[in-house]
């Protein structure tokens, strides 16, 4: 509907068209010193990835060699989630929305996924991959080679 298209939609669409990510859609990357790999396990040191210490915090982990582009979020006290960050529709990036407890595609498609990676709405080609996550002391561990 024409009345549902607002200023924010226009700005986001214009920036996307020009190849720039709008500020609302930029997720910080985890510092390289916070990320380590041990076989099938990715570890994030919470003392170095400080964004993840607070509920609502989010970081990305990008590793081209392992073909990883993850979004890791502190969804609620004691609960972290890790999902593929690339939308299944056209490869646009997804961002975390803490209030809605979901991920949203930054393209004009605006597909939305729950924190299990299940598509809630939008024209796309399936769900996002979600990964098993556990907290061990001051570390978040993600089983990146297996699907949860």
Image (spheres, grey):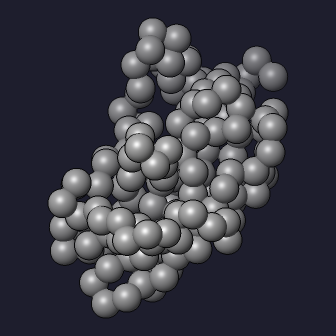
Point out residue 94 in the picture as x, y percentages from the top left corner: 55, 42
Please tell me how many numbered marks the rendered image carries. 0
Which residue ends up furthest to the bottom in the rendered image? 137
**In what quadrant of the picture does the C terminus appear?**
bottom right
Residue found at x 38% / y 76%: 140
132 or 25: nearer the eye? Answer: 132
Which residue ends up furthest to the front in the rendered image? 39
Q: In this picture, is 90 found above or below 45?
A: above
Residue found at x 36% / y 33%: 23
53 or 14: nearer the eye? Answer: 53
Quarter residue 111 falls in? top right
Point out residue 146 in the picture as x, y percentages from the top left corner: 63, 67
Quarter residue 13 falls in? top right
- Horizontally, residue 33 falls left or right of residue 82, namely left
Residue 123 seen in the figure: yes
**In what quadrant of the picture does the N terminus appear?**
top right
Residue 81 seen in the figure: no
Residue found at x 69% / y 46%: 112
Q: In this picture, is 2 found above or below 112?
A: above
Point out residue 142 in the picture as x, y percentages from the top left corner: 48, 71
- Horizontally, residue 111 falls left or right of residue 140, namely right
Residue found at x 45% / y 9%: 18
Point out residue 54 in the picture as x, y percentages from the top left corner: 32, 72
Which residue ends up furthest to the top in the rendered image? 18
Q: In this picture, is 117 found above or below 111?
A: below
């Amino acid at each position: 509907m024409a009345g549902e298209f607002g200023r924010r939609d226009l700005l986001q669409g214009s920036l996307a068209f020009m190849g720039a990510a709008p500020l609302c859609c930029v997720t910080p990357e985890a510092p390289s010193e916070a990320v380590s790999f041990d076989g099938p396990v990715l570890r994030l040191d919470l003392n170095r990835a400080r964004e993840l210490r607070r509920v609502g915090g989010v970081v990305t982990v990008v590793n081209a060699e392992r073909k990883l582009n993850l979004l890791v979020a502190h969804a609620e006290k004691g609960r972290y989630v890790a999902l593929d960050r690339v939308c299944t529709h056209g490869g646009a990036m997804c961002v975390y929305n803490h209030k809605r407890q979901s991920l949203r595609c930054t393209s004009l498609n605006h597909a939305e996924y729950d924190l299990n990676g299940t598509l809630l709405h939008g024209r796309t080609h399936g769900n996002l991959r979600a990964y098993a996550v556990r907290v061990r002391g001051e570390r978040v561990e993600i089983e990146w080679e297996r699907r949860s």
